[in-house]
Amino acid sequence: MNLLDAHLVPAVDGVAYGLLLFVVAAGLSLAFGTAGVLNLSHGMLYAIGAYTGAELSDGTWGGLAVGLAAGTAAAAAAGAGLSAATVPLARRGHLAQALLTFGLALIGGNLLIEFFGADELPVRVPEALDSSVTLLGHRYPAYRLCFILMAVLLAAFGTWVLTRTRVGAAVRASADDPQMLATTGHSPRAVHTGVLAAAGALAGAAGVLGAPIIGPGAGTADTVLMLSLVVVVLGGLRSLWMTFFAAIAVGEVQTLGVSLAPDWAPYLLFAAMAAVLILRSQFTEPATAGHGGGDAGSDPVEWLRRRLSASFKGRGRGTAEADGVVRPSGRGGPLSRLLRGGPDDSTLASRGRQAAPLLILLVVLIALPALLDAYSLSLAGSALALGLLAVSVTILTGYAGLPTLGQTAPFAVGAYATANLADAGWTVGPVQIVVAAIAAALFSVVTGPAVIRARGTTVLMITLAIGELASAAINQMKSVTGGADGLVGFPPTQALWGGEGMIEEDQVYNYALVVAVVAVVATIAVLRSPAGKLLTGSRNAEARMRASGHPVGRYLFMAHIGAGALAGIGGSLMVTVQQYLSPADVGFEIAAFALLAAVIGGSTSVIGGLLGAGLIVFTRDWVASSWPGHGPLLLGALFVAAVYLLPRGLAGLRLGTGARGPAKGAELPPDHDSVPAGKVAP
């Protein structure tokens, strides 16, 4: 009984917290499950409501009502604007949506801080609620009990609208059969806009009412987004009741779990999220949907033989591939020849055409120490480290068809392995690189089985969970990672045995350049080998590869391990260049930046990934230094511009040809349950 008394208040707090997350997650589920938009700016919609409500709160009932109306309307308008922003991406898949909405979240978050300030705003509630009541012998805030009632009423009203009204029927029809909905006189486009506006309104209302619980501050949007994603994954998209119970469970873990098991609480949510996704993926055969598609009527063995044979043959002005589609393969300009890294460039002639621009790029990189100051040169070294992370994302997303938001996990393993080696006196660069690569590869061996079975957005969410679990471990394992304070003060790296530690910026940069060149050349050699062709075949026609007897799972597993090792090398380089390491260097934002770099360069362009990383570092650190405090705004603008202006990446810019849609393999592969067998996601 004493134990029950001790944890009663946290348990009730968990209910209030869970109901708040339910209202927010219901909007996220509505946007994704009905409108088909993977909205990574949903936390920002909550923040809009929270900031608006806090600004208008004056301790009266009228102030609460005005704040609720204004915050809900503002977030609904932002949701409607999001609908307009995502319409041009309707046929480009969820990866483009995720990058666009993440960019909009960066822009919106920066603007909110600019307008309301960086400090958490105080929220004044009506005097009648700004007190405590007796609950089973304990004093409990009256506002939280009132919020529980308001959240239940809001959830009940939303459920009634969705299931019992003509508006709800139209919404459900737009998800199931938009063509049939159009024949009834309803506009699917208008319903799409209404759904996203309603999702925004739910988030905004939750923000106003939940501001006293999760107050408006710099990290509010990220916290709400992550927890809402966990709720949606655990509850699924088909039942509001399952979402409700998942939200209550998450709320209890966040409150009661912290008091009962403080050491385990940081891991529980994302571990549960990963477990649910992995279990779901086990019941679906990957080969049924595949990564891509093709003509199901041809003999699979003969089709594969022709497909792989075509990969090794040169191409002229156009090539009729085995699926019957003629695709142009013009030579393009130097930029195109530099960036193309896909499987169609494997002949001696095309390699010769690419050699000159590659050498030009290498000469420019070698000349940078003579052209840049010390600060800019250190940024160039950081870009090389982030570039290797982006190349590892390119391998998984572009070649293996496994879009990832979790490559910062092996990146962190390599970084912390290098920092601890240096602290222990092992400062020889090649030793650090090898140990970092092995440690990251072993980490990828452990996590690989959880990743390679899934496809599409499921992979994206599993890797996100792995990345967040790694972040939790970094904050918990203070003896190894330094916790939130990070690591600093370890000896500088030696380029060779017996040499002095590298202190000068040009020494560090030259070392990073040599390591990056060797790693990139080795990566390109593997991707252009028969093993790389088989990996690409697994991405484009998994069903036929399996039918012809190829161990596709083994190919993907090896790609996952190789990409992890490459990310580990990038993490080692980052430590050498920066000479310090903090959790922010390996967090979710860096994972999103690496994915953006891969998309900017072109999904199958190794060199493009490096250049994309350079553009991100240039924007984040060099350009933003002349406009302090607006780095997120500039990066968000870069996300948005890349999604709209580079649908095929830099590798798709060809002389005399326009970007005519996403390159093959550039988009998120279909989920098992979202694209019928035999069809290809647009």
Image (cartoon, grey):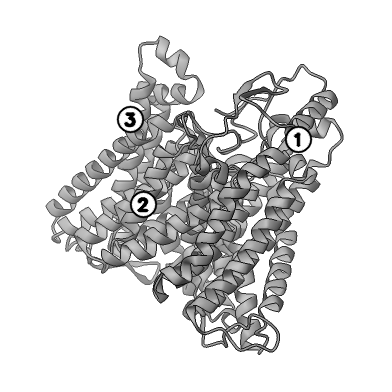
Foreground disc of the pair 2, 1: 1
- Residue 194's disc number: 3
Query: Is residue 18 visible to the viewer in this orientation of the structure?
Result: no
- Residue found at the very far right of the displayed protein: 549
* Residue tagged 1: 312
- N-terminal of the pair, mark 2 or mark 1, is 1
Callout 3 secondary element: helix
Q: Up-down: is 557 above or below 382?
A: above
Q: Residue at x 54, y 54 (%)?
A: 360
Amino acid carrying label 3: it is Gly
Callout 2 secondary element: helix
**Real-space Cα distance between discs 2 and 1?**
40 Å
Relative to residue 40, is residue 474 drawn left or right?
Answer: right
- N-terminal of the pair, mark 3 or mark 1, is 3
Query: Quick one: 98 or 466, which is closer to the camera?
Result: 98
Residue 226 point in image, percent of width and height: 47, 55
Q: Residue at x 61, y 87 (%)?
A: 423
Q: Up-down: is 638 above or below 295?
A: below
Query: Quick one: 476 or 533, which is closer to the camera?
Result: 533
* Residue tagged 2: 636
Q: Residue at x 62, y 68 (%)?
A: 514
Query: Quick one: 97 or 133, which is closer to the camera?
Result: 97
Amino acid carrying label 1: it is Phe
Relative to residue 334, is residue 298 drawn left or right?
Answer: right
**Real-space Cα distance between discs 2 and 3?**
25 Å
Query: Is residue 274 visible to the viewer in this orientation of the structure?
Result: yes
**Real-space Cα distance between discs 3 and 1?**
50 Å
Relative to residue 555, is residue 294 drawn left or right?
Answer: left
Callout 1 secondary element: helix
Amino acid carrying label 2: it is Gly
